Amino acid sequence: MKVKIGLFDFAGCEGCQLTVMNLEEELLQVLQLVEIVEFRELMSERAEQIEIAFVEGSICRPGDRERLQQIRDRSQILVALGSCADNGGVNALGSDRTPEVLRQQVYGSQLPHLYTETPQPLSAVVKVDYRIPGCPIDGREFLAVLQALLLKQQPELPSFAVCVECKLAEYPCSFDYGQVCLGPITRAGCRAICIDGGGHCRGCRGLIDNPRTSPYHRILEQYGLSIDEILDQYRTFNIGEQESGK
Amino acid sequence: MSQRIKLDYLTRIEGHAHLVIERKAGKVTGCRLEVVETPRFFEALLQGRHYSDVATIVARVCGVCSISHTLASLMATEAALKIEVPPAAQLLRRLLSYGEIVQSHLLQLYFMAVPDYLGAASLFQLLDAQPELVRRALRLKRVGNRICEVIGGRPIHPVTTCLGGFSTKPEVGQLKQLRQELVASLPDLEATVELFAEFEYPQFSRQREAISLQANGRYPLHGSILTSSSGESCSVADYRTQIEEYLLPHSTAKLARSRSGSYMVGAQARVRNGAGHLSPMAKKVAEALQLEQSGNNPFENLKARLVEVIHCIEESLHVIDELLLHGMPRINSNSTPVVGGSGTAAVEAPRGLLFHRYEYAADGLLQQADCVIPTAQNLASIEADIQLLLPQLLDQPEELLRQQLEMLIRAYDPCLSCSTHLVKLDLA
């Protein structure tokens, strides 16, 4: 029997589900082991029982909470797919304002049907068993997590920083360019793709478990960068973590 | 007897929408698309952000067209801050856009449209019966993604793009390899053309206005002039004089209308306004598919999309040749940003015109943003088509009615990677 999996989404860009679709060749192999029983974007079928649910996006409305609870109720394992589901991601950027203010800024007044709440990660509503961080997720990591789950093992995320992957790949250090980089404190698993692309780490995969902040402060001082500069960078993808005090 | 037909979660506008049809005594009395997607307030989220962070954030509006959002954003900021983009970087951007259009169109054509025309619930369902078709679909989608990977670093949310051009360039070996892969995809593309030439497309016609970027010696993609099939044109910077945004109580998407009312953007609009600039191979494919010229049958959007795939592949080969021949001496700006001021840019995203407009303060922080997405512009047109199509369908069995409406809406490829096949028809 193939393992029944489902893909679901809430407020987000759908880039994580698309990353799964983009596995292309591997997807065909995956489909020999699993059956996608629900994936609203591509299929009409709806499933009563799901063994592994992968859920993308943030929770922003009362209806979202109900729908997520229903998904939880019929799933054995629930995996948060990507930053928005994992910690609120970019959706949480407006957390410094009330949803009413945001609505007013974009749509003007008098539109009660646009009611939303401050975006929250899935874990604010239901028990999340595992998570695949990143914006978007890394396809390889999705496969690794799926493989572990199919083998009834605990999927594990790297516990070291992006810096390690970056150094192993021998990319030039962003700090040498005077660029604030979150590589030293961000969880690895992306193969430092942004630094490979000539950019810097914006921390989309969230903090490592035990970030060593004091050496990091020294790096900042050494390069003449301020805490504010680092916080500015940190805020892009990790507002949710700050808010929930993780 | 009044009836309410509700198609739940039938398409998405970066998410979710329902279609509600009301009829009384056999006549359609109402028809509306309820866009119930969670609003994410991106324009507000950008306020107060430094210009160097804006494109990265706004790319997250849409995973399917993150490249278009990135490029529109970068170009709007470049216009505001007077940052020049060297020619090699402009070539790379074109190539990146071609990659996105190829991958987005092929996803729509194979994963959303093909099941409609082959009577399946999803492409996955055809895995046993027609494995080669599914494999071909994935192989071809891969080709589009490969362009995005080689130029943008990854298919979704590119990492090599930056203000003024690119932060890294592809290696010559990668470009040569990519070129080979593109050439190797031609037999699969030919088979795709044969497949789509066999389908029977519903007959339907409604006069409509088509708006796109103006061809500037080249098929419209990135540009500074808007053009309408009605003959009008204006500068992209003045888009607000041509296009007005408005809200409806049932929709969380901002809709857009032109002075004449509803209008169409996307592949069909581009082909209508710029057919003469299609690549030679794309012109032949348009003929083989008997793509009708008027652009008044939205179902023909599928053909237009396939014609564009061919165009983008052929043009990509030329761009790669140019990059290999002349090298990429400079891929980033060496001008200093003039901080403060406003800028507007438009790109032809896979689904049509995408506008970004920003205002920056003297400290480099964004004050105001406006983003107009293609689907918001097409919504009024979709509703108008449904209203015209419905009376012909009301006597049909439910199943056929549902199928035809879904096919019509999907033909527009509303902004999401895929249109759902899950439709609840509630003839209450």
Image (cartoon, coloured by chain):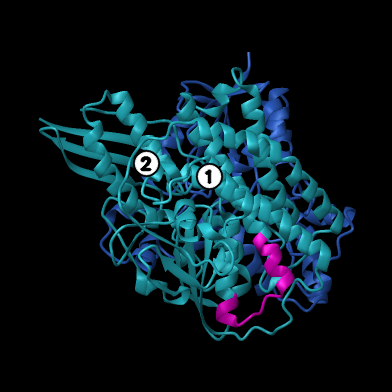
Q: Which residue is identified by label 1?
A: B287
What range is drawn magenta here? B78-94
Q: Colour of chain B?
A: cyan
What secondary structure is found at the residue carrying circle 2? helix
Q: Amino acid at mark 1?
A: Glu
Residue visible at 67% across and 36% down?
Answer: B188
Name the kind of residue labelled 2 in the image: Gly
**Quadrant in which the N terminus of chain B appears:** top left
Q: Is residue B379 left or right of residue A198?
A: left
Q: Chain of mark 1?
A: B
- Give the percent coordinates (x, y) of residue B356: 49, 68
Residue shown at 83% from the left, 56% from the top: A166
Q: Main secondary structure of the magenta part?
A: helix
Question: What chain does badge 2 belong to?
Answer: A
Q: Position of residue B367 (x, y in %)?
A: 48, 77
> Is B46 placed above or below B32 here?
below
Q: Quadrant of residue A199?
A: bottom right
Task: Point out which mark residue A170 bears.
Answer: none
- Tell me the residue that label 2 is attached to: A63
> Residue B241 or A180: which is nearer the viewer?
B241
Can residue B327 be spotted in the picture? no
Total labels: the figure holds 2
Q: Secondary structure at mark 1?
A: helix
In the image: residue A151, left or right of residue B174: left
Q: Is residue B334 above or below residue A7?
A: below
Pick the residue in front: B47 or B380: B380
Chain coloured blue in the rendered structure: A
Which residue sits at x=45%, y=30%? Answer: B116
Residue A200, percent from left and from top: 74, 64
* Disc 1: CA contacts within 10 A as few (<14), some (14-19) or many (>=20): few
Asked if the magenta segment contains residue B89, the reply would be yes
